[in-house]
Image (cartoon, rainbow, N blue to C red):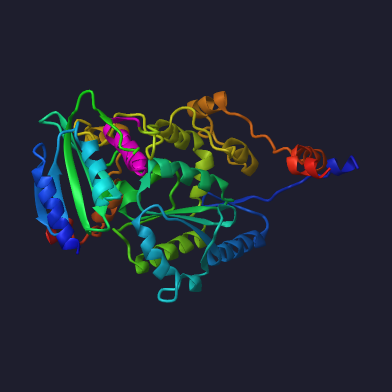
Amino acid sequence: MNELDKIPVRQEISVAEGNVKRSNPLANVFDELVRFCQSRSMFMLHYCTGCGAIELPPAMTSRFDMERLGIQPMVTPRQADILLITGYVSVKTLKRIILTYEQMPSPKYVIGICSCTVNGGMYWQSYATAKVLKEYLPVDIYIAGCMPRPEAVISGLRDLMGDIKSGRADNWKRYFQNYDHYLGNQQQLFGEDWQTPTDIIAEAEHYGLMTDQTLGEHTALLQKHQQPLEALEFSLGEKREKIQGENPREKNNE
Amino acid sequence: MSKELNLWLDDLLKDIKIIQFKRKNSRRVRIDIAPEALPALLELLQGRASYVHLSAISCVDWIEDDEFELVYHVWSYETNSLVSAHTRISREPGVYLSVYDLYTPAAFFERDIHEMFGLYFEGSPDMEKFILTEWNGPPPMRKDFDSEAFVNQTFNWEEYHPQWLKDIEAEGGGITTRPEDVR
């Protein structure tokens, strides 16, 4: 078996115009196919924070019919591709949005609808709303307007589909690559003891997306007080007997 | 029937010397009353005139007068009319009596006012944080809280004329209709 190591592995790398091409001629085709399929089947989690949500039912239902593009609403973040944030984001809501975003599987895309997600919108003076959404999450596409019509929403989603197809929509990688930056902005708002149940640094290692921007002073602050996640205790036999023993009704029956 | 009841009530309330009574229309009455007498008035209205529904307690910060104005809106299903009882209390120390023993929903309104204005209600069951659970600053609805300064200090702004837009404009594109052209 040791002889296997002695076989020289040679990877042909041809450099054309600065781009490194892979030796497998079908690799690119396959990637393109995967991206095409991804862009045609997107499950959307609409986090209806503000008034923009009212434009989504017509965009989803028969009049404008998002489903003809392959976009469907999804009920849980664990199975969603797109996080749609419709309208103003209060500081309290932003926490929930970040928790939701971190639970979504990669690749994931964030769309900010309405002017409020861009720059605070008409709530720019409010003490309670976060102003620039992309400081806390990597946003793929903004659909501006107060509120954008369903045509604009669908146009924005088509833009996102185009980006995914051409491989430009990789903002979700930025969250892992620049986690220190995003975490710093989050800590500024939520305080230094801010911690989410998802371990982003471990996920960045898993995806191979660790850069020198991933770790920094803010993540060091996080790791100082971070409590490791523990699996829930799972036992069927003993616990159930215990609970039954404590039940006063059963005691009476005995 | 309800009109007749209203007339009787008007006559009765006009007889009380310490309150200012003003009927605005057939369904609205405004009463201005001293803070010491307000719980007694509410008890009278609830017990004797079936004003059983406390719709809201609103609060106004009159910073020039150094006073808070509290408005208790009570509704009667018998006379179909709303009584707004206005009272003014001093801004410092900003402590007032709770009407929780008369109207149970007052607990929510008082907790909300405590959070937004910093006004403390003695006898209210819970004066903890209500909606602004993640807020550590001063009560934000007070007139002396400068929301704009707070926002400018806390948040960053997106640039309105970023480089990518300038690049588009250099190529002859960009915003075709500016907001000031439309207005």
- In the image, B97: left or right of A3? left
Query: Residue A34 is drawn in which quadrant?
Result: bottom right
Is-magenta flag for residue B40?
Answer: no
At 10% from the left and 36% from the top, the residue drawn is B18
Query: Residue B32 is drawn in which quadrant?
Result: top left
- In the image, B164: left or right of A210? left
At 19% from the left and 47% from the top, the residue drawn is B84
Q: Residue furthest bottom?
A: A62
Spot occupied by residue A127 in the image (x, y as percentages of width and height): 30, 38
Specify the quadrant that holds the N terminus of chain B: bottom left
Q: Is residue A71 above or below residue B8?
A: below
Query: Residue A155 is drawn in which quadrant?
Result: bottom left
Q: Is residue B15 visible?
A: yes
Q: Residue furthest right?
A: A1
At 19% from the left and 27% from the top, the residue drawn is B91
Q: How many marks can you see?
A: 0
**Which of A165 and B30 lies nearest the eye of the viewer?**
B30
Q: Is residue B160 visible?
A: no
Q: Is residue B127 above or below residue A254?
A: above
Q: Is residue A14 above or below residue A232?
A: below
At 63% from the left and 31% from the top, the residue drawn is A228
- In the image, A150: left or right of A65? left
**Which of A24 and B41 lies nearest the eye of the viewer?**
B41
Spot occupied by residue B51 in the image (x, y as percentages of width and height): 26, 50
What segment carries the magenta color? Answer: B102-123
Spot occupied by residue A125 in the image (x, y as percentages of width and height): 25, 42
Specify the quadrant that holds the C terminus of chain B: bottom left
Is-magenta flag for residue B110?
Answer: yes
Q: Is residue B154 above or below residue A122?
A: above
Spot occupied by residue A11 in the image (x, y as percentages of width and height): 70, 49
